[in-house]
Image: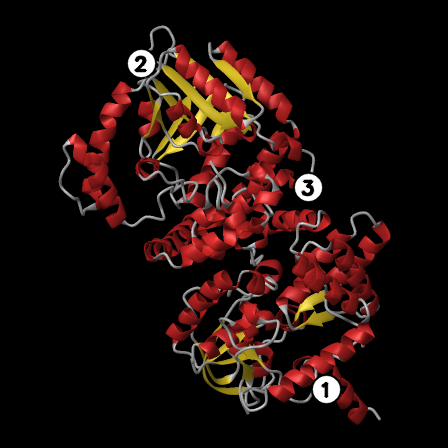
Amino acid sequence: MQSTAHNFKHNAHDALRDANLQDSLSKLKVGFSERRRQAAERLPEFEALRDRARDIKNHTLANLDFYLEEFERKVIGLGGHVHWAPTAEDARRIIADLCKSVGARTIAKSKSMISEEIGLNDHLEALGVEPVETDLGEYIIQLRHEPPSHIIAPAVHLTKDQVADTFLEHHRALGFTKRLTERNDLVAEARQVLRQKFLDADVGLNGANFLVAETGSSMLVTNEGNADLSNTLPKMQIVLASIEKVIPTLEDAAVLLRVLARSATGQESSAYTTLNTGPKRDGDLDGPSQYHVVILDNGRSSVLGTKMQDMLRCIRCGACMNHCPVYGAIGGHAYGWVYPGPIGAVLTPQLIGVEEAGNLPNASTFCGRCESVCPVRIPLPGLMRHWREREFERHLTPRTVRQGLSLWSFVARRPKLYRRLTGWANQLLALFGRGEGRYRSLPLASGWTRFRDFPAPQPGGTFHTQWARQRSRTRP
Amino acid sequence: MKLLEDAGCVVEVPPLQVCCGQPAYNSGDRASTKAIARQVIDAFEGYPHVVAPSGSCAGMLAHHYPGLFDDDPAMKARAENLAGRCHELMSFLVDVLGVAKVKARYQGAVTYHDSCSGLRELNVKQQPRTLLGSVQGLTLREMKTPEVCCGFGGTFCVKYPEISNAMVGEKTGDIAATGADTLLAGDLGCLMNMAGKLQREGRAVKVRHVAEVLADMGSDAAIGENR
């Protein structure tokens, strides 16, 4: 996917003026966070589970090579294949070759963020293979040629009316000529259209929430059951996942599942939780005859052992974006690449470069709400700050910011000078603000005064001046 | 000061203290942050308690300073020592001194914004509400989302003014919907941001630091008020 992360400010500007988007966001902001809160309250051990989930992921990351090799050994033992993809290009090539090997014309996909990360659909289309997204949200945005705007609710930026228009436009040729207005009718129509696609598909491709080393299984949760069709009907199944998805045991998976759905949607568990363990065995009634797991690195292994490693704990629940006031204001597309919100602000600079995505870790107030809800306790503001430090070290911070900052810190390191200058500024602002009590515009402060008044200080000097004066009166 | 002295504290203001260094810290300038942190640690050496009327400044000292000196064990120990002595004002009054009520009067309905750093780094939530409950004449009307960020975020508000504006606009809408005539909070950055937006929108909500009301100084000019 072509990144527009460098254009973040411009993207955000447009997003703030998009009435449909703002309408959708106003619902998302309340809905997801309220449901998560209730789910967490209903489970007394929720906080303790978060600790366990964090510890499981930390343990796995500290022994990642071991568990990945263990997983591979188990998959091979089941008669499946594991393909290692160091880069996105490798992953695209491996999947294209697999499709070619069975003469695939259509592949049924269930939701996979890694597929978005490697730009799989465009690549397959160019090779004459039709990828069909079978998750409802993904299906809608595929019809509209849009990227997902949320990692678990890819079409959350759209209103029902927009979906109705999209379906009418694309389904007319299939004989669906009525514009639908009811939510259930829209879902029913998508089901009808997709049913044939499932039957036609030569290959089923899905992501994975977890790869279980103990059993060689890939685990997937959905609310639509689409993945269960896409990975049982076609003759070849491809699982596409990144290296940090591996976990040691099924017991660990149970812990992670308990925090995943609650954090994501407030459900106790997703409607469907499926384990895929190798190809169809002798005597199985159905299932794929070929089972392939493609495991992507794409730069992740380079953060192992560094301060940034915590980002790899992410289980992609989306809680950080559901609770982020910046995401809530601008939506996911403004972030300009695959992963939006706080986790996107941490992950994207790693995956596509901080030169391209430098705005993302800066566009945060560090309010900390993301960290307070993260099921695996990723210190998201801290990781964003690490990126800011790297940008500063590499002189990527804008020149005006650097200059302003170095002037300010020069003064701040000289307490007497600092006191004198802030005293003068205080007097000036108090003097010229007389009569109004506030400023409607101020030189060098247009970023503030464009949208807000600037309160003028009350006369009488700074706190330190007043304190010194009072002291000299009371203690002569 | 009045609140602390009424509670029996002897208050000192070390003249050589400066800003806690957050602007540099959050802009990625670690070297300047460390230099500033050293000064602050020096300035507050020897005091049994260090109290700040701001959650974000107190949070900086209490949570972030020690991590700045991972490569300097002696300095780290001093930073940790300061961190253990540092408190946000409301939390200090209620959690450390055990103050449960104040002598103050404020006629009106107020709403209280939970500033992010105080709330999430220092667990300041119930303490100001407890104390406000003892102010005569005051009623508290909660916002729908008092815990959502106001969009200030230090340099964020001038680096991304449009996003910040959308956030503070949502906040002022929430404030206005309570019908309260006064907005209180415990952090100056948030207060200036919300006061500036309320005034630009022409809303007649007064904005004050919660300590002003608790210290019975609620008849002084509010933030940005013309007297």
Q: Secondary structure at mark 2?
A: loop
Viewed as shown, does residue B211 lie left or right of B163?
A: right
Viewed as shown, does residue B14 lie left or right of B145?
A: right
What amino acid is found at the position of numbered circle 1 in the picture? Gln
Q: Quadrant of the C terminus of chain A?
A: bottom right
Q: Is residue B187 visible?
A: no
**For the residues carrying marks 2 and 1, which lies nearer the camera in this image?**
1
Q: Position of residue A401 (x, y in %)?
A: 66, 60
From what the image shows, is residue B50 above or below residue A324? below
Q: Position of residue A75 (x, y in %)?
A: 50, 15
Q: Secondary structure at mark 3?
A: helix
Q: Which residue is denoted by mark 2 in the rendering?
A: A286
| Discs 3 and 2 lie in a common subunit | yes
Q: CA distance from mark 2 to mark 1?
A: 82 Å
3 or 1: tag closer to the N-terminus:
3
Q: Which mark is residue B13?
A: none
Location of residue B21 (image quadrant): bottom right
Q: Nearer the viewer, residue A130 or A443?
A: A443
From what the image shows, is residue B201 above or below residue A328? below
Q: Position of residue A370 (x, y in %)?
A: 52, 51
3 or 2: tag closer to the N-terminus:
2
Q: Nearer the viewer, residue A344 or B14?
A: A344
Give the residue drawn at x 46%, y 55%.
Answer: A12
Disc 2: which chain?
Answer: A
Q: Which residue is denoted by mark 3 in the rendering?
A: A307
